[in-house]
Amino acid sequence: MIYFPIQLPVEPEKFRIPTPNSKALLNLDHYIAIMGVLNMSPDSFYVGFADEYQALKTVEKFVSEGVDIIDVGGQSTRPGADEIPEEEEIERIKIIAKIRKRFPNLPISVDTYRSRVAEIALELGADIVNDISGGRFDENMPDICAKFNSPAIVMHITAKPKYMQELTISDEVLLEEIKRYLKNSAEKFERKGVKVVIDPGIGFGKKPHQNLMIINRLHEVVALGYPVLIGISRKSFIGFCVNKDSPPPPQERLEGTISACVISLSKGCRIFRVHDVSQIRKALKTAVSILAEKFAEDFPLLSQRV
């Protein structure tokens, strides 16, 4: 993790996130964390794996580059994506057991909005549930997190991925609606004793320019008092920033991803969900050094163990 103790309007205890299987403490009051994306869905918008061998090699690469959390997803949630059967999603996330065996102290999150998938993932060794619906698509999710003492990442979304781009929100109420949704979702999990991270849901039911609004005003989301995760990596709005008439494909959006991550850092973001761990980590270390006016320091997760 990268040491960056900045003043935020927070209760420090909310920013100390224990992970039950890796036994690590994500101290987000004093550090920022990088989450590496591992999509076990071959139809993901950018880099999905059908082959476990290649997926595990990617995890090894991420670990060598200093990743703090691995986020494993079993179905694509890109705009317009169809749902896959629950059993198929479960089969895809079973790689979690192999990751846990190979890296016993590495925090692992499972990207799912289905409580049964989350339960199996936690049994296999996952630590965190990353729910794009914030518990709205499956009301049993808070109970599953509580059962395993698992933290939850709750995100804002307008509808399931198949239809979310048809149900966008007007600019005038966008930030207020996101904040209301996240606060209500977070409180549902907190009532069960679950630690919460919030995510404004870049690209999930937002018009391209609205993602710019969210990032520029991310400090308003931070002011809710929870650690904030941002999922910006190589998303389509970056292509529109580069060339709105002929946006480049995901393969050409790394520089824009770096820029958006650095701005999010300056607004108070604490977790960065990315496909490019090494490049984002170097960029954030440089940004932290400038903002703190001293060279950034690394601390391995082992030094943060509970």
Image (cartoon, rainbow, N blue to C red):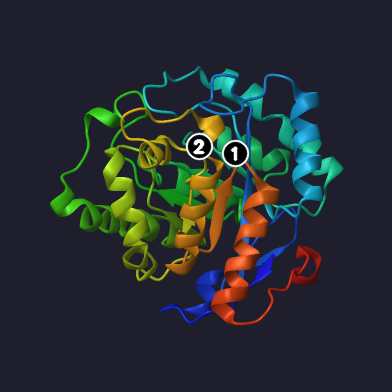
The local secondary structure at tag 1 comes to helix
Seen in the picture, residue 281 relative to 156 is either above or below; the reply is below
Q: Quadrant of the C terminus?
A: bottom right
Which disc, if any, is residue 152?
A: none
Residue drawn at x 42%, y 67% as measured from the top left: 267
* Foreground residue among 3 and 23: 3
Which residue position is annotated with label 2?
115
Q: Are circles 2 and 1 on residues that touch, CB within 8 Å?
A: yes
Residue type (three-letter) at the residue carrying disc 2? Ser
Give the answer, above or below, for where 18 lies relative to 10.
above
Q: Residue at x 39, y 41 (%)?
A: 133
Instruction: Write down the residue under mark 1.
Output: 119
Asked whether residue 17 appears in the rendered view, the answer is no
Q: Nearer the viewer, residue 206 or 76?
A: 206
Q: Tag 1: Cα neighbours inside 10 Å, few (<14), some, or many (≥20)?
A: some
Q: CA distance from mark 2 to mark 1?
A: 6 Å
Residue at (55% x, 46% y) in the render = 129
80 left or right of 87? left
